[in-house]
């Protein structure tokens, strides 16, 4: 059994659910991207996955910076503790990510020295710019597509009859995002968005929040596509 469904995430609930529904076309393209479908089928070219893993390492470094910025955007200790828990989770995840990448022949020094893809730069700098120019609610709207989207992808793949786990080289990656511990952190992030929305006037800012959420979601899709594009680039070299 790869996931614990005793306390499932309700992706349609609250402010997150409304933002997800308002950007449904972008969201569905993201969570059902060909990269994701090939992960589930076990047919994703290894070169595409290695490219993704390397850029994801670089992405996580900037994502940690964004969560550190989020901590500074809050003014109460409960909010700061919640944001700090997410920051610590990402910083703690990096060694695990590095260990997993080593099983794919990638070491940390090699990944750290890799130039950032334009898709990585576009996504991470967009999130950081939103954080610097807006408040905690704006930044959370930019962060949640990644945080919650991976949980939805993990659950969808694990529940899909089309997913192949036996002999699938990506089975452990899929299982990681179907893990109950990860889902607990996702629920906490969704709850933090909900609270921030109540405290910071989400209703009057809904159009702008939707724009931020949609842009981050499209940048997630571009990140998947960046991995797929690596296959064609390798063949042309």
Image (tube, rainbow, N blue to C red):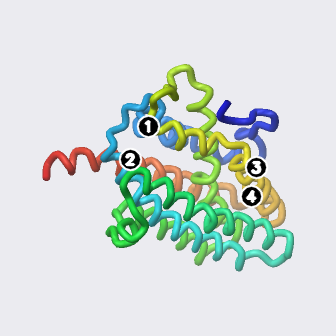
Residue 193's tag is 4
Give the number of the disc on residue 184: 3
Q: Which mark is residue 49?
A: 2
Q: Residues within 10 Å of mark 2 (few under 14, many from 20)?
A: many
Q: CA distance from mark 3 to mark 4?
A: 14 Å
Disc nearer the start of the sequence (3/4): 3
On screen, 100 above or below 35?
Answer: below
Taking the spot 67% from the left edge, 68% from the top edge, the residue there is 87
State the residue position of label 1.
169
Report crowding for label 1: few under 14, some 14 to 19, many 20 or more residues within 10 A (C-alpha): some
Circle 2 or circle 1, nearest the eye: 1
- At mark 1, the secondary structure is loop
**Quadrant of the image occupied by residue 24:** top right
Marks 2/1: CA–CA distance: 10 Å
Question: How many neighbours does mark 4 have within 10 angstroms: few (below 14), some (14-19), or many (20 or more)?
Answer: many
225 lies above or below 139: above
User: Going by the picture, which residue comes out furthest to the top?
Assistant: 161
């Amino acid at each position: 059994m790869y996931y614990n469904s005793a306390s499932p995430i309700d992706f349609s609930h609250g402010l997150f659910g409304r933002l997800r529904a308002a950007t449904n076309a972008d969201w569905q393209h993201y969570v059902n991207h060909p990269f994701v479908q090939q992960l589930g089928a076990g047919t994703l070219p290894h070169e595409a996955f290695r490219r993704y893993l390397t850029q994801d390492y670089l992405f996580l470094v900037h994502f940690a910076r964004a969560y550190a910025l989020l901590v500074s955007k809050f003014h109460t200790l409960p909010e700061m503790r919640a944001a700090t828990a997410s920051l610590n989770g990402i910083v703690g995840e990096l060694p695990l990510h590095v260990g997993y990448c080593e099983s794919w022949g990638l070491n940390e020094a090699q990944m750290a020295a890799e130039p950032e893809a334009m898709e990585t730069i576009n996504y991470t700098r967009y999130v950081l710019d939103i954080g610097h120019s807006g408040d905690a609610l704006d930044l959370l709207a930019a962060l949640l597509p990644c945080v919650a989207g991976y949980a939805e992808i993990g659950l969808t793949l694990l529940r899909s009859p089309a997913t192949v786990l036996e002999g699938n080289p990506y089975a452990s990656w899929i299982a990681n995002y179907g893990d109950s511990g990860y889902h607990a952190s996702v629920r906490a992030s969704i709850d933090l968005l909900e609270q921030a929305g109540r405290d910071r006037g989400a209703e009057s800012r809904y159009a702008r929040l939707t724009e931020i959420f949609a842009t981050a979601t499209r940048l997630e899709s571009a990140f998947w596509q960046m991995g797929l594009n690596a296959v064609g680039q390798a063949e042309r070299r």
